Amino acid sequence: MLTLSKLSHARGSSLIQVACVGMFTIYEVTHMSNKGLSGSAIGILLAIENGLLLASAPLWGWLADRFACYKQLVSGSALGLAFALYWLSRSETIADFAIYVCLRGLLLTAMSSTMTALAMSNLASNSPGRGFSAYRIFGSIGFMSGSFLFPIIFQKIEHILIAGACLLPLSLYFVLQLENPPRRDQGQNGEAKSPIPAAAWIFLAAHFIISITEPGNLGFLNDYVRELGGSPKLMGWYSALTGLIALVSLPAMGRWVDARGLYWVLGLGFFSQAIRPFVISSLSDPNWLWLSHLCHAFGWAGREVGALILMISLLGTQRRATAVSLIVAIRMAGTMVGSYLMGTWADRYGYPEMFQRISLIALASLPLLFLAFRAARKKPAAASAAPSA
């Protein structure tokens, strides 16, 4: 059984953190565009940002596992990200935005991936899929609430970002109630020192390719909404819709994974995410672009739960933070490439053709995913045993 007090604290931290940090994803591209930056310049800035996320994620994961300093990393990075939100709200020039992307790139994974590992270590459960979804669903509630309410309360993007900067430090109250996992002994043998299996590397390669689509889910999609004449309020509603879909689908995905449906969930998740940009490219009315978010149930929630459980089962519970950070790092690597391609191709070909090209690239992840499944089945402990959360 999950410990109620720890679950409540993990939920509270996730709700506030995702609600506030979600403002980065929703508004950074539009804010840069409003300040006169070109699509190519935005793509380069986001590529730098995600390059830093890629480089920093494994470091934070290793530090968290090695020194069991999960709470300290989450707390310090939350304060730094609050300042990054404020800085973004005041940014006017490309130099300002360069400082912003450095702040976000260096600090985001220290909070997001380490927070997930901290929550998993506190939520002892025999059903890791349900345990993770019970915690993570409150992040979706926070994202949905922030996406819907902030644009109603505040008329300007700058004011929305400042509100997020003020609220994010409140999450520390909940974070500090959780417990760090036991510190790992330097001389410890076993899973903590075993090499990363081939199945994990193949899966990470597939995850890299599918992650190329990530910038199109909200950032470039919202700019496409703007280009088609949609309002900032419509962007907020669409972003809130992704939170609503995640709210409904996360528990279902957790149950499916625990019922030994891990491979089905991941397979459908990768396919849904691959066709999502094609759905966007097929719509020219901003009021109908919400249809692309129907792919979010498997495309995001299914991948979110499935990837975490698979990687922890392959690497072992003593390397939770490392498993999460590798997922985050590879996602950021794909997002970095996707940001550059989308920004460049949007300028050169326009949004519809850009989304079609991205969709074709993403479909190449499916053969690699099935190879990863095959390799994982040859490792019985990884493929069939549910890891302890």
Image (tube, helix red, strand yellow):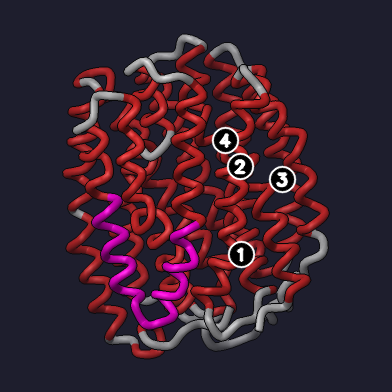
88 lies above or below 386: above
- The spot of residue 246 in percent (x, y) is 47, 54
Q: Nearer the viewer, mark 3 or mark 4?
A: 4
Instruction: Say which residue label 3 marks.
Output: 78
Residue lying at 74% horizontally and 74% vertically, measured from the top left: 4
Q: CA distance from mark 4 to mark 1?
A: 21 Å
Q: Nearer the viewer, residue 63 or 135?
A: 135
Say which amino acid is labelled 3: Ala
Q: The C terminus lies in which quarter of the figure?
A: bottom right
Of marks 3 and 4, which one's residue comes earlier in the chain? Answer: 3
- The spot of residue 1 in percent (x, y) is 66, 84
- The spot of residue 14 in percent (x, y) is 65, 55
Cβ–Cβ under 8 Å for marks 2 and 4: yes
Of marks 1 and 3, which one's residue comes earlier in the chain? Answer: 3
Disc 3 secondary structure class: helix
10 lies above or below 328: below
Instruction: Say which residue label 1 marks.
Output: 135
- The spot of residue 36 in percent (x, y) is 46, 9
- Magenta part of the protein: which range? 248-273
